[in-house]
Image (cartoon, coloured by chain):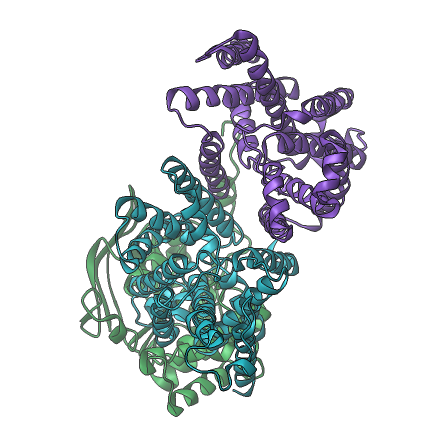
Chain colours: A purple, B green, C cyan
Amino acid sequence: MARHRPTIVLVLLSLLALAAMAAFMTVGAKGQWSFVLPFRGIRLAALLLVAYAVAVSTVLFQTITNNRILTPSIMGFDALYILIQTVVVFAFGSAHLASLGPNVLFVVEVAVMVAFSALLYRWLLSGDVRGLHLLLLVGVIFGALFRSLSNLMQRMIDPLDFAVLQDRFFASFNTVHSEILGMAGLAVVAVSVAGWRLFRTFDVLALGRENAINLGLEHRRLISVVLVLVTILVSVSTALVGPVTFFGLLVANLAYQLAGSPRHGVVLPVAILLAVICLVGGQIVLQHLFAFDTALSVVIEFLGGITFILLLLSRTRR
Amino acid sequence: MIEIENVSKAYGRSVVVDGVTLTLPSRGITSIIGPNGAGKSTLLSMVSRLLPMDRGHVRVDGLDIADAASDVLARRLSILRQDNSISVRLTVRELVTFGRYPHSKGRPTAADREHVERALGYLGLDGLADRFLDELSGGQRQRAFVAMVLCQDTDYMLLDEPLNNLDMKHAVSMMQLLRGAADEFGKTVVLVLHDINFASCYSDHIVAMRDGRVIHQGSPEALIRPDVLAEIYDLDIAVETIGGRPIGIYYLGSGSARRQQMPGPNG
Amino acid sequence: MKALAGACLLIFVLAAASLFVGVSDVTPGKLIGADAGSRALQVLLASRIPRTLAIILAGMSMAVAGFIMQMLARNRFVEPSTAGTMESASLGMLVVTLLAPQAPVMGKMLAASAFALAGTALFLRILRSIPLRSVLIVPLVGIMMGNVISAVATFIAYRFDLLQALAAWTTGDFSSVLRGRYELLWLSFLLTGIAYFAADRFTVAGLGEDFTTNLGLHYRRVLRLGLVIVSMVTASVVATVGMVPFVGLIVPNIVAMAMGDNMRHALPWVAILGAGLVLACDLAGRLIRFPYEIPVGTVMGVVGSALFLALLLRKRRQLG
């Protein structure tokens, strides 16, 4: 039984995820299928990309940092992405931006993001900032700083420009930025191909720095590469639906509980499937059962915040 | 005189102090010794009203600590616990001045300031008086806390392992200082001590606890004896008389104790 | 004493600047010899003076509230915005606005105080299960608790179409302060005065429960007094101008570095520098993008989080 558990879990979750997707496409549909299907299809594709990006980025980030509380969004990654978006708008002005087109803009933003986060987080994770709690708090406050800075810059943009651009800043599960869907998909595929080549090292990295080095991995280089992959994934999800601080934490920790195996071959797919079920399923439940339109992200923040506090407390009591 | 009458404390099922009845004489130094988990610190905390007791009474000079006003007690009895980590950034002098709080209620008079300076001098803290506590070593900080309690100028001083964090030199001078407080100022000092030899050299009276009960009490000569110590600590301790004081030699342990600590192949 | 007088002078200069910075043209020249009906004088009396007073009162009392909380929680990094107090207060404002929209401001503020009190008490309750030495987990738990509470508030506000009102309580902004709309803040000034009166008690409480009892004080009573002061101050600030984060964290920490935590000494400094910091941030908010205004909450967010980070990284050797 225990040996087959991962397989059983994967099959069950796959079925649930498929059911959620089918429901998403069909439940409550009015009017022409030829209109409904492509319209919902695009949103579904975006949600799937987000689920994949959040799940993989969180699990990998926790692998390279060797703990289960730190996540990219708690460390302020998505706040940094929003800041970069704002700075780009600030620097180019809205008129220029329109001529550039969303895809070019996305690529520019991701490039800047990778450069910046590589600098900042490599320093943070290099061991100069010791202790998980300090790291967490520094990350949280960096997040707050990035958010306040983007807030400040948004206020400094001409109010008229701001109104035009507001839509860009406030992505949510309901106003998915589908215009960059193609480019985002491409980025995710590229990350996955690169990740696939490193796949075997993930389980070793999870053993910690000393063990990984002892087993012959080029630890420093690998961490840097994984960090870049994580950064791109965070950019994708933030660009599509905006920041959702605790989603990754919820999904990853649920996955560790359910998977019954610490191997990435199991944990990663379980996390991805869970993310799909939560996002797509949650959206349907809230929309059609409770008629709450944009509440999903709030619900995730609520549950995730409580999970985070409990995780922290259970670790210190031990 | 501190009268302890049938005092008990339990946490859930585990009884930490079990019906202790004890009279601590006025003046002089009383040391409480015993192995870890004997209930020494818990008893001291209850006597000093830091911890409510489940059963029993404690009277300090006839004053029942359960009914007495806390600020009245604070002028009669002071307590220093062993674990004093504080995050508040105070200078040594500021901390010691708070020892006068029960008397001055935060408006120190010239007489209070004199007390403070005397306590600082007594503990050799003059040079450190304006340093912040977080800039001191563990031993210096411990001395600052003792200075505060001393400054409180109560008849009874209760100290839970005051030698914690002190090196040999400072441990000895701390014990000499407490001895002086008892002899010169007529204070009653009650200590929890781990080192039986400090207890032997400096106390008038020793109380031995084990499993939440008082199992022996008496003069150092009556307590620091191989048969009594074996009963308290489960350890064969040779006792030699050095400089007129019974000194326990416990560093080498005994065969039987070592065997008990090393589980055999069957666990 | 001399230094304190100097700091007061600085506040006067900032306050004077605050009186004369704004869209409508109010200058000392225009006021001299102006008749009672002049526009400059009206603006000064109805808007600029109330605004400046509100800034000073809010800055002082928030800084002192943070200071008190640091004593009660025995932790350097606690203040109303890192302990769920502010978020609870704004949740309280939201709930009372839903249930009793006609209630007077004072009533709403009292309801918000009750929420703030409950939130902070819950936080302190959680803290009791954390070993004292894990210093950094305390603000982490507090910040996250604040997040959870604001998620609840956002959810409710979203359902009842009150997001705009909620935004007013969550972003500190002095631009809408007018005569007749800020007087509640005098209450927090009064509470700050009480805090000064009880300063020694709070310092003693900061040493821990055992120390407090040893010195003959009732720890629970000191705790309750402090909680009530902090909750009411936070609620009155949230009700009148919205959240002003980090003041209560940055100012007491800087003061403690220079002169320690003895509240009797440090409290006047904390109050004055708190007022100065908020004055400076509000002025900056008015000047950066003149004639548009950037709310003080936003400016404070940037300045406060940057200083908080500096503080953490500076102390990282001891904390890690």
Q: Is residue A194 left or right of residue A55?
A: right
> x%, y% of residue C118?
32, 51
The image position of residue C305, as x and y in percent, is 59, 56
The mark tally for this picture is 0
Q: Position of residue B204 (x, y in %)?
A: 36, 73
Give above or below for C86 relative to C266: above
Q: Could you tell me residue C277's position as x and y percent?
A: 55, 68
User: Is there any visible trace of residue B167 in the rendered image?
Assistant: no
Residue C302 falls in which quadrant of the image? bottom right
Rendering quarter of residue C95? top left
Q: Is residue C108 left or right of residue A186?
A: left
Instruction: From the viewer's side, name the closer residue of B43 and A221.
Output: A221
Residue B197 seen by the camera: yes
Check the image and report above or below for B29 versus B185. Answer: above
Q: Give the residue at x 67% y 23%.
A: A181
Could you tell whether A259 is left or right of C147 in the image? right
